[in-house]
Amino acid sequence: QVGWNTSADDKELEYKPGETITYNFLSNKTFTAKYATAYTITFDKQGGTGGTDSVTVEHNAYPPDIEVPTMLGYDFIGYYDGPTAIESREYYEADGKAISVWDKADATLYAAYLPKSYNYLYNCGKGSGTAPEGGTISYDEALTFADNTCIAPNGYVFDKWAVSNSDDLLSPD
């Protein structure tokens, strides 16, 4: 049900559930339930950009494919009926294809993302010896730099780690 109508043929006034009016009719009225067959799905991108804003879908049908949003440092994993993917029902997968028939009225679906993972390495640069072991880290995760295990070249002392042009190699500066 999407609302109430003052006539059975849907040609008079319409009211949404929860709407408040001042009753100024000069006769008794019967409010007839109004039903819709097509609904609007609105997409809350939760900080992402691009992608489809909304679609129309028939009840008990699969929604149409959509363009998915993007977010710097994160992978889009789907749209859910709750603001977090935990304990929410998934309606769209990461590729923008619907996986559930639409069983709601007009509603908002919420984007879910996972942080991307990156590898990082340490390198002794102009020094020698064995560099500390690198690892894998997720976008926006805190990284505590390792103590230096490299031997500095003659006349130098280790100062700090520097990021190389390859964006994944940490070398003594």
Image: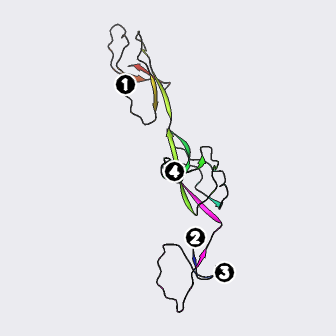
Residue at point 55% right, 51% down? 89
Q: Quadrant of the C terminus?
A: top left
Which residue position holds label 4? 88
Which one is earlier in the sequence, the residue at label 1 or at label 2? 2
Mark 1 and mark 3 in contact (Cβ < 8 Å)?
no
Mark 4 and mark 3 in contact (Cβ < 8 Å)?
no
Mark 2 and mark 1 in contact (Cβ < 8 Å)?
no
169 on left or right of 57: left
Alpha-carbon distance for marks 2 and 3?
Answer: 15 Å
Secondary structure state at the residue bearing disc 3 = loop
Occupied quadrant, residue 126? top left
Which one is earlier in the sequence, the residue at label 1 or at label 4? 4
Q: In the rendered structure, which segment of residues is drawn in magenta? A: 18-43
Residue 9 marker: 3
Q: Nearer the viewer, residue 8 or 106?
A: 8
Q: Residue 112: percent from the left, percent from the top? A: 51, 46
Image: 156 above or below 14? above
Which one is earlier in the sequence, the residue at label 3 or at label 4? 3
Q: Nearer the viewer, residue 55 or 153?
A: 55
Residue 2 marker: 2
Number of numbered discs on residues: 4
Residue type marked 3: Asp
Dot 1 surroundings within 10 Å: few (below 14), some, or many (20 or more)?
A: few
Alpha-carbon distance for marks 4 and 2?
Answer: 23 Å
Alpha-carbon distance for marks 1 and 4?
Answer: 37 Å
Residue furthest out toward the front: 87
Q: Which of pointers 3 and 4 indicates the residue nearer the eye? A: 4
Q: Residue 159: percent from the left, percent from the top? A: 33, 19
Mark 2 and mark 4 in contact (Cβ < 8 Å)?
no
Residue at point 43% right, 37% down? 140
